[in-house]
Image (cartoon, rainbow, N blue to C red):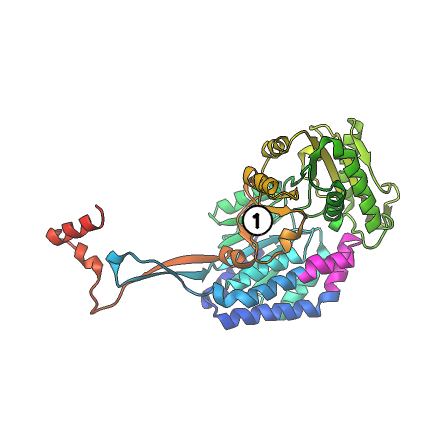
Amino acid sequence: MTELRSLFENHRAAYLENPYPDLATRMERLHRLSTALAKKREGLIAAINKDFGCRSRSETVIAEILGSHGAIHYAEKNLHRWMKLKRRLTSMWFAPAKNYMVPQPLGVVGIMAPWNYPMHLSIAPLVAALAAGNNVMLWISEETPNTTRCLAQLIEENFDPSLITVVAGDPKIAPEYSALPFDHLLFTGSTRVGKLVATAAAKNLTPVTLELGGKSPAVIAPDYSCKEAAKRIAWGKSFNAGQTCIAPDYVLLPEKDKRAFAEYAIKSFKSFYNSILDYNYTAVISERFFRRLRDMVKEAEDKGATVLQPYGITESVVAGVHKFPLTLILDAPEDCAVMQEEIFGPILPVVGYKTLDDAISYINARERPLSLYCFSGKEATRREVLRKTCSGSVGLNDVLLQYLQEDLAFGGVGSSGTGAYHGREGFETFSHMKSVFAQKGIGHFTGAKLLYPPYGPVAKTVLKLMGA
């Protein structure tokens, strides 16, 4: 705790020396980060692969490399607009004053990144914090030690330690880290841990952005091709082996289509990967998480659910690398873990409905999800689902891709999170939008003087005109 406090104080002192970095300084920092990431590209890919045991190179390039550079380039392109003063209307009674908003750096920002996308979920919020002019302490999950070391080396080689510091995650000191008096704290992870982080931060009234998870549903309307929906959902659920906070967590579709959907999804998975050991299919991060997924499936099967898998699990663990195939579960009882907990893996329960209203009611009876997916060719149906449900984000006729849109804010609602970032919203999350009322100086008449005491006839007339 003493070391963490010392790190924080160093960052605080550095921020106070330069509390409002200009545009050129911020742009240089972003460019330096982009250049450093490009030079370290292969090392980062190798580190992530080592942490997972097997992480698809293509998926790392898409989600980690391209996603991180995309966040930087978008910030570089738009930062000059984000930093501008925002003019606001001024009441005529206070003329000739002006009102405007100034985006002010908050100070020292804490970021807690998870293991499932350790590079991108470190870099994306870091970009937003740097664009906003802050100093950053970056905590990265203990599950990805190789990635943490690689990113820490990159930061140490390119940035002053009082501007950015990487802290290797350790559950034992996580409460102390969360309790530091940050000016803002962003946490990405589970709802359970998010509650602990928010509780620790509350002691200092530290504002928090919580990017959590939950059970994100995919609703397939009767008019949509079951086969096409299965292919798109199977891709999203198997990307990173389902270890994605916005991955579809369960599917709702007409009762008669359940079996067909499951078989189409299995067929799609087999067309993506020629075996469970295919290098392009990412492994589960650790044996502990693998066992959890295996136990979920076994519990559902023991309780009467139908389980479909393209490849068996017995041959999926080789030399300490844990591969778990896409697994479809039909008719799982509601008290099963797969129906109650966020799955965070390639297991997909399939739930039938009689009417679309039944599907909407099923969703609304549960905690609000981080994402929701709706597959329908009818605008009226899509609009109905959008209006009658509440989720952090929505994907229409596809999955996952809303996250990759830099100009769309990303965040949850209710138990799936609070606050948002990405693009302009990321800049504003790590800025204080300071309100400024600017009156003219000496020698200028101001309308406010009409209301100075003593409150005679003029003041009374003005108050009447103002609507009093």
Q: Amino acid at mark 1?
A: Gly
Residue at the left extreme of this rendering? 457
Quarter assignment of residue 356 = top right
Residue at 65% over, 71% down = 35
Left or right: 132 as drawn, with respect to 115: left
The secondary structure that dominates the magenta segment is: helix
Residue at 85% over, 52% down = 278
Which residues, given as a range, are shown in magenta? 43-66
Report the front residue among 302 and 385.
385
Q: Position of residue 226 (x, y in %)?
A: 74, 40
In the picture of the structure, the residue carrying the numbered disc 1 is 411
Q: Residues within 10 Å of mark 1 (few under 14, many from 20)?
A: many
Q: Position of residue 219 (x, y in %)?
A: 66, 39
Locate the C terminus by quadrant.
top left
Q: Is residue 56 magenta?
A: yes
Q: Is residue 121 visible?
A: yes
The number of numbered badges drawn on the structure is: 1
Residue at the right extreme of this rendering? 315
Residue 236 lies, with reference to residue 158, above or below; the image says above
- SS under mark 1: strand
Residue at 78% over, 51% down = 282
Report the front residue among 148 and 39.
39
Q: Position of residue 88 (x, y in %)?
A: 36, 59
